[in-house]
Amino acid sequence: MNYIGSKHKLSDFINKTIHSVVGENLSNKVFCDLFAGTGIIGRNFKNKVKKVISNDFEYYSYVLNKNYIENHFPIIDKLKYIEKLNNIGLKEGIIYNNYCYGSGSNRQYFSDENGKKIDAIRQQIEKWKVTSKISNNLYYFLLASLLESADKIANTASVYGAFLKHLKKTAQNRLILEPAEYSVNNNNHVVFNEDSNVLIKNIEGDILYLDPPYNSRQYGANYHLLNTIAKYDIFIPKGITGLRNYNKSLFCSKATVHKVFEDLIKNAKFNFILLSYNNEGLMAVNDIQEIMKKYGKYSLEVTNYQRFRADKEANRTHKANKTQEYLHILEKYY
């Protein structure tokens, strides 16, 4: 999934830094990914640590991580269900009626056929769940598979803040449900869908990885359609883009970010805290340093990184092709 702030390309840098700080053997450690997004970092540590705690305020992220992190045993016949869903007929529903041009919505996030296919698959998954035909583990596997497969044929420039006027080439492809395969191991992991500053008071562990929003872009707005597919609930879409009511993070406001960040650090019951941030963020490097060093031994690692681009260059506040990605490190004192 092409995701704002994804740490996929930075995972080696993050992995090496964590090992250099904490040690090579993490098998007895509890690792927390508090702003998990698509779960890339949690997935990287799932087979290295005793337990992963994963959390995100967005429901689509919760679905992805319920599959990729919490699912750790094989699910019998899961590919048979994928095959059944790929062979299902078309149905009109929430996605076609509100986000496809042929319905009269004047929105074109998906082709008409793909919108109906998403509706048919989503309705069948829910029917299987409410009639106890599938387990919770299989439910989240199928939902995660649908989210990622639908994203591949979405008619957007990456995020769902707007749709394209004409169907791009990839959006003309037929939706094929591809399995969201997860790693299997013997460890139990847990996934939450909570406000990070509330959850932090109720969890503890060894390594806390933080990747909060850097700027004013709200993930609930940019990925609202993934939330709609995941929740599949009834609401009235708003405006040209069909927005739903969405979570607004205090990390996305310059007026609130410093306080909410310090509260998070202060309440964290973890030995090592690592914060991913960059030079275009709302908090300056010195501000982060001043906050973190109140609570322990602070250090900083830096690397260059290609900027995420989902808009036209003329609309960008930051014109540079690359950013400096910071990994702020705190060994917390108790």
Image (cartoon, rainbow, N blue to C red):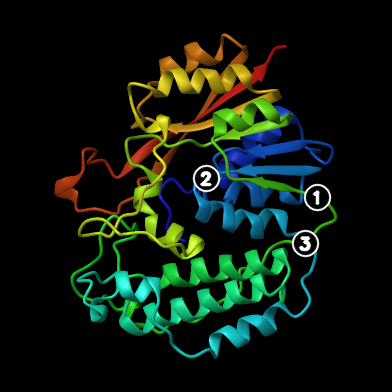
Residue placed at 41% from the left, 62% from the top?
A: 234
Residue of label 3: 184
Q: Is residue 110 above or below residue 248?
A: below
Residue 109: name its quadrant. Answer: bottom left
Residue placed at 56% from the left, 33% from the top?
A: 196
Q: Which residue type does callout 3 highlight? A: Val
**In front of the other: label 2 or label 1?**
1
Q: Which residue type does callout 2 highlight? A: Leu
* CA–CA distance in space, label 2 to label 3: 23 Å
Residue of label 1: 188
One can see residue 38 in this view: no
Residue placed at 66% from the left, 81% from the top?
A: 81
Residue placed at 52% from the left, 76% from the top?
A: 123
**In front of the other: label 2 or label 3?**
3
Residue 137: name its quadrant. Answer: bottom right
Residue of label 2: 10
